[in-house]
C-alpha cells in the first residue's frame, strides 16, 4: 500500500509543481489589473479627473493631454459593474477629485454582468484589484486560484509575452494603453466593422440595471461635489452603419436624460463625430494614437 501511495505521489508531484509555478506567475507578474491597482493609488493626492470604462476609453483617452492630473482606470471589456466597484473602492481616497468620466459605448448599457468577455477577467478583478465580486460564487474553485482561470495554451502565450516584454501590463503609469495604437498600423476597417458588430450585437434592449448603476455613481459624485461626464467615444462610420439604429437611439436617449435630470452630468457624444476619419482608427471601433490625441484634446477642452 505504501509503495502504491508513493507511486501516486511521484506521479502527482510534477503536476503540483507546474500548478504552483503557474499560480505564482499570475500572482507575481504585473498585468493591467495589478498595475492599475498600484498606479491608481499614486494619484490619490493629485488627480482632478478619473476615467472609467472599457477599451474605448483605454484606447481613446490619453491623460497626457489634460492640463491637470488625470488617471485612466479603464480596461479592456470593463463593464459598468466593475466601474462601480472600482469607483466605490477608491473615490473617497482621492483628495482633489473634480471630474469622473464614464464610458457609454454601444454595448455598455445592455451588458450582462457575467458576459463572455468577463468569464475570466472577473477573477483578476477580485484577486489583483481587491474587489468584492459578488458574481463569483464561493464554491467556484477559480475564486481561490488564478492558475485555474486560463487554458494552458493561453498561459503559454502570456509566458512568451512576459519573456519578450518583461511584463504583461500594457498600460502607461497614467493608465493609457501602450499597444495597438501605432498610426497607420490598423486592420482592414471593412472587415473589422463586420466582425466587431456581429460580436457586439447581443439583441438586448433592457438598459435598466446598468442605467441604475450609472445613476448611483452620479448620485455619489453629486454628494461629493464631483462632475460626471458621460462619453460615447468615436467609432468608424462603417461600424455605426451596421449596428441597430433603434438600440443606438435608445443609448443616446438614456444619456441625454441622465444629463437632463442630474445637474452635475454632461453628455459628450462623439460616437458619430465627423471630425474623425479612417486614419484616426486602429480598427472599426477603436482609435489609434493619432485619433486618441484628437479625442483627448476635445475631451480635455470640454472637461477642464
Image (tube, rainbow, N blue to C red):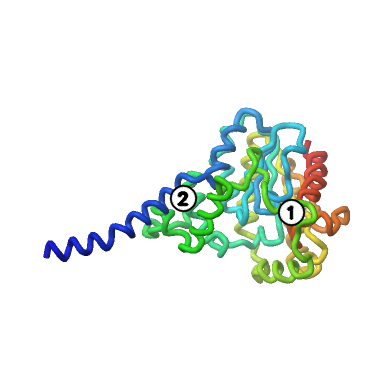
Left/right placement of residue 159 relative to residue 284 reads left
Residue 157 visible somewhere in the drawing: yes
Say which label, 1 or 2, has the lower sequence index.
2
In the rendered image, the vertical position of residue 249 relative to residue 179, given as above or below? below
Furthest toward the right, the residue is: 274
- Name the element at disc 2: helix
Q: Nearer the viewer, residue 107 or 286?
A: 286
Q: Quadrant of the N terminus?
A: bottom left
- Which dot, 1 or 2, sits closer to the camera? 2
Q: Nearer the viewer, residue 65 or 184?
A: 184
Furthest toward the front, the residue is: 164
Disc 1: which residue: 255
Left/right placement of residue 110 relative to residue 1 reads right
Tell me where residue 140 appears, x and y as whole percent: 39, 59
Left/right placement of residue 126 relative to residue 5 reads right
Q: Quadrant of the C terminus?
A: top right
**Mark pair 1, 2: CA separation:** 38 Å
Residue at the image point whose x is 48% and y is 49% from the top: 126
Q: Which corner quadrant of the image does residue 36 belong to?
A: top right
Marks counted in the figure total 2
Residue 85 visible somewhere in the drawing: no
Disc 2: which residue: 26
Left/right placement of residue 299 relative to residue 199 reads right
Amino acid at each position: 500500500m505504501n509503495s502504491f501511495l508513493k507511486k501516486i505521489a511521484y506521479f502527482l508531484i510534477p503536476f503540483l509543481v507546474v500548478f504552483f509555478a503557474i499560480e505564482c506567475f499570475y500572482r507575481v507578474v504585473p498585468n493591467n489589473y495589478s498595475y492599475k491597482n498600484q498606479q491608481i493609488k499614486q494619484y490619490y493626492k493629485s488627480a482632478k479627473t478619473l476615467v472609467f470604462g472599457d477599451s474605448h476609453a483605454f484606447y481613446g483617452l490619453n491623460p497626457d493631454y489634460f492640463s491637470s492630473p488625470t488617471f485612466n482606470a479603464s480596461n479592456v471589456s470593463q463593464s459598468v459593474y466593475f466601474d462601480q466597484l472600482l469607483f466605490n473602492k477608491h473615490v473617497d481616497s482621492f483628495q482633489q477629485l473634480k471630474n469622473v468620466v464614464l464610458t457609454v459605448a454601444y454595448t455598455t448599457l445592455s451588458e450582462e454582468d457575467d458576459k463572455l468577455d468577463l468569464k475570466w477577467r472577473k477573477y483578476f478583478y477580485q484577486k489583483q484589484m481587491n474587489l468584492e465580486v459578488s458574481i463569483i460564487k464561493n464554491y467556484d474553485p477559480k475564486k481561490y486560484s488564478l492558475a485555474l482561470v486560463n487554458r494552458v495554451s493561453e498561459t503559454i502565450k502570456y509566458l512568451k509575452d512576459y519573456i519578450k516584454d518583461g511584463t504583461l501590463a500594457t498600460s502607461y503609469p497614467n493608465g493609457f494603453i501602450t499597444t495597438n495604437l501605432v498610426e497607420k498600423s490598423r486592420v482592414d476597417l471593412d472587415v473589422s466593422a463586420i466582425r466587431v458588430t456581429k460580436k457586439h450585437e447581443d439583441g438586448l434592449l433592457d438598459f435598466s440595471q446598468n442605467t441604475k448603476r450609472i445613476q448611483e455613481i452620479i448620485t455619489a459624485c453629486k454628494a461629493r461635489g464631483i462632475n460626471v461626464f458621460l462619453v460615447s467615444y468615436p467609432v468608424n462610420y462603417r461600424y455605426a452603419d451596421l449596428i441597430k439604429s433603434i438600440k443606438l437611439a435608445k443609448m443616446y436617449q438614456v444619456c441625454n436624460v441622465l444629463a437632463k435630470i442630474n445637474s452635475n452630468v454632461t453628455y459628450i457624444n462623439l460616437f458619430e463625430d465627423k471630425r474623425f476619419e479612417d486614419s484616426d482608427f486602429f480598427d472599426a471601433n477603436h482609435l489609434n494614437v493619432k485619433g486618441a490625441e484628437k479625442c483627448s484634446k476635445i475631451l480635455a477642452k470640454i472637461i477642464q
